[in-house]
Image (cartoon, rainbow, N blue to C red):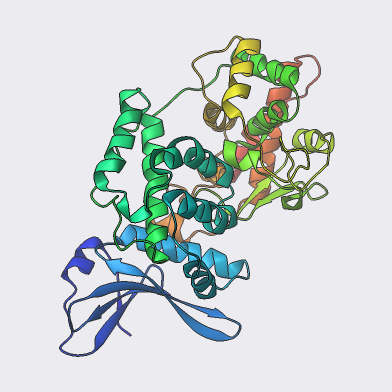
Amino acid sequence: MPKAKLSDLFVKRAPAPKSGRVEYFDLAMPAFGLRVTSAGHKSWFYFYRFGGRLRRLTLGSYPKVALKDARGMARDAAIQVAAGNDPAAERQKERAAAPGSFADVAAQFIELYAKRRQRTWATTEQYFRRDIIPAWMDRPIESVTRGDVLMLLDKAMAEGKATKANRLHGHLRKFFNWAIERGFVETSPMTNVSTPGKAVKRDRVLSDGEIVAIWKAAGDIGYPFGDIVRLLFFTAQRREEVGSIRWSDVDLEAGLWRLPTTKMGRAHEVPLSQAAIDLLEGLPRFGSYVFSTGRAGDTPVSGWSKAKRRLDASSGVTGWRLHDIRRTAASGMARLNVPPHVLSKILGHVSDGQGVTGIYNRYAYDDEKRRAVEAWAQYIGHLIDPSGSNIVALREQAHADQA
């Protein structure tokens, strides 16, 4: 079982053995690897244990499935195993379903993949139902070509919606990789289709006056979106993660919010300030989700755009996005002298920006994180009510942490 640091160049140059096959296990992800046969065929695999047995999952062939995508599939399989599911058995069940039309396969993708593995599945479903499925509704999935994909992406770009085009590209790439895994198609029309829109790096940080205006507007629109906005300020987490938080993820007694997975594919613990706990304790409970627009509380919120327009109208603040709250909170805590490595842990970043040191440093900084979010919550409290808050700026403690 040779081991190798798998890279695009290594995979491309990996020689075929004289006979049989050879399997290279990835140094970065030991259970994941590349198989090369004597005929030169290359495929991806992932090993895992389920029910006491060692199982093997084939993830697709190279170059149809790129290294980056294969690694993502392996991470998804690991998450599935951790959740008590057998990826190989799930695949057999899914292959038994008739492919049908594009709409049929897309519906299976939402049910069998997005809802099981994505906390933000409601956003994925919205893109499919609003933009993707209507484009190829009754067509056989294998009839969708690269040209069809480019037409859909070009349409979004022509409308001046580069961000939307980029997200459509990401959803379609993941969908067709999943379709290859399940045997619905042999190749992906996303092959050699580049991300269409140039990513625009945003640096919008809300001023203190804008924070106050948006905070008060959040109170005007109320539950659920107004309370989501306020929790965004307190926690500095992503919109999709706050919007899909479940009561089972929250331990109010311990003052902790545990995210099973984040956008980065990792578990993450978020300390809750007393103000955040008070907010959560005051919310209605009528389902599994903390915030829901469904009557039974069994689905995450939807209707972000409409809620954002209401916030703009009520606050008078324009030219901002909900994600700017996360940047604003991070910048605010930095002004309170929260060290970068602690701030990185609060934000749930994979690396804290310290290179090799960051890779090996696994200290969670739980106490430092809690002091930081508490100080930030008190800072917000002072902005809202200057006469009623006692701010703890954290400066002395932050200097002590850095010493």
The quadrant of the picture occupied by the C terminus is top right
Q: Quadrant of residue 394?
A: top right
Residue 250 shows in the view: yes
Residue plotted at (40% across, 59% down): 179
Residue 313 position within the rendered picture, expressed as x and y whole percent measured from the top left: 62, 11
The quadrant of the picture occupied by the N terminus is bottom left
Residue 265 shows in the view: no
- 317 is higher (above) or lower (below) than 73: above
Residue 282 position within the rendered picture, expressed as x and y whole percent measured from the top left: 84, 34
Residue plotted at (79% across, 33% down): 279
Residue 157 position within the rendered picture, expressed as x and y whole percent measured from the top left: 32, 28
Q: Is residue 136 left or right of residue 106?
A: left
Query: In terms of depth relative to the viewer, which is nearer, 381 or 167?
Result: 167
- 392 is higher (above) or lower (below) than 5: above
Of all residues, the one furthest to the bottom in this rendering is 19
Q: Is residue 215 left or right of residue 361?
A: right
Residue plotted at (66% across, 11% down): 314
Q: Quadrant of residue 5?
A: bottom left
Query: In terms of depth relative to the viewer, which is nearer, 137 or 261?
Result: 137
Total numbered circles: 0
Residue 360 position within the rendered picture, expressed as x and y whole percent measured from the top left: 46, 61
